[in-house]
Image (cartoon, helix red, strand yellow):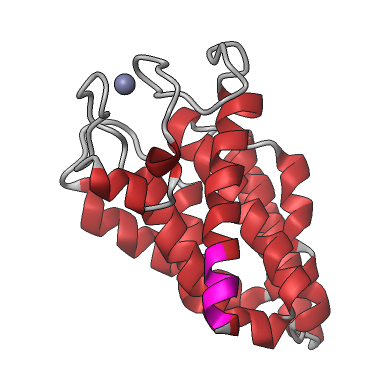
Amino acid sequence: MQVCLIFVFIICWISFIVAFTHRTLLNPLKYTSSFSQCDHCLHPLNWWQLIPVGGWVFQKGRCHWCQQPIDAFNPMIELILTAWYLSKFQIYGAIPTLIILTTITIITTTDWYEQWINPVFLCGFLPFRSVMLADSHWFIYLIEVSLILFLLGMNYHQKLGFGDTAYLIIILFSVGLTATCWIILCACLLILLTSRYQTKSLPFIPYLNLGLILII
Ligand SMILES: [Zn+2]
């Protein structure tokens, strides 16, 4: 029963944060009503269209009013991050996991749709630091500093965006060297697996976040 309540709260929270990100960070001038609207025709949505995952399934992935396809991003992020929260909140604590989940939701949404993140939101990863063992050996610190310099060099030569660079440095501080290396490896493998079906350039942060929730 308790797990069901947490499931409902978390999936509704993610749905709210994605909509909030669209309205405040991505398209602050697009929406004309304070109620939820279709992204294409701006028709106000009924209550059943707002049900996380269910709204997308009931409409068979197309807007009930204008029949335009609705992005599968929302049901995907809602299901994946809710499953991650339920498997981790007892380990990391309910509130720290909620903060991390909110950060992942915001930066994944902005990077997925417009390929940018606001680095301020990366502070939401810092609760990891208090719940995970940090690498302590001096040799590990040396590799960490080398990796940070390498990332800054990549950024300087415009091979890596500012948001991606800041993300990786904060993650390195928050979860340590070993986990960071696994996250990067995981993200690169996921990009290799999916890039053959994509012609446009891919945002890196959603893949890094997917790697993060698989590794952490
Ligand atoms: Zn519509």
Percent from the top left, x then y, of residue 130?
83, 77
Can residue 151 be seen in the rendering of this structure? yes
Based on the displayed image, in which of its 4 quarters is residue 46 positioned? top left
Residue 135 pos. (x, y %): 75, 84
Q: Residue at x 24, y 19 (%)?
A: 66
Instruction: Please check the rendered image and state whether residue 89 is part of the magenta-colored stretch, yes or no.
Output: no
In this rendering, is residue 85 above or below 122? below
Q: Nearer the viewer, residue 18 or 156?
A: 18
183 and 7: which is toward the camera: 7
Please state, as top left, top right, bottom left or bottom right, where the N terminus lies in the image: bottom right
Q: Main secondary structure of the magenta part?
A: helix
Magenta residues (range) = 3-8
Residue 161 in the image: state x and y as whole percent: 57, 36
Residue 184 visible in rendering: no
Q: Is residue 6 magenta?
A: yes
Instruction: Say left or right for 189 vs 138.
Output: left
Q: Quadrant of residue 25?
A: top right
The residue at 22%/33% (across/down) is 62
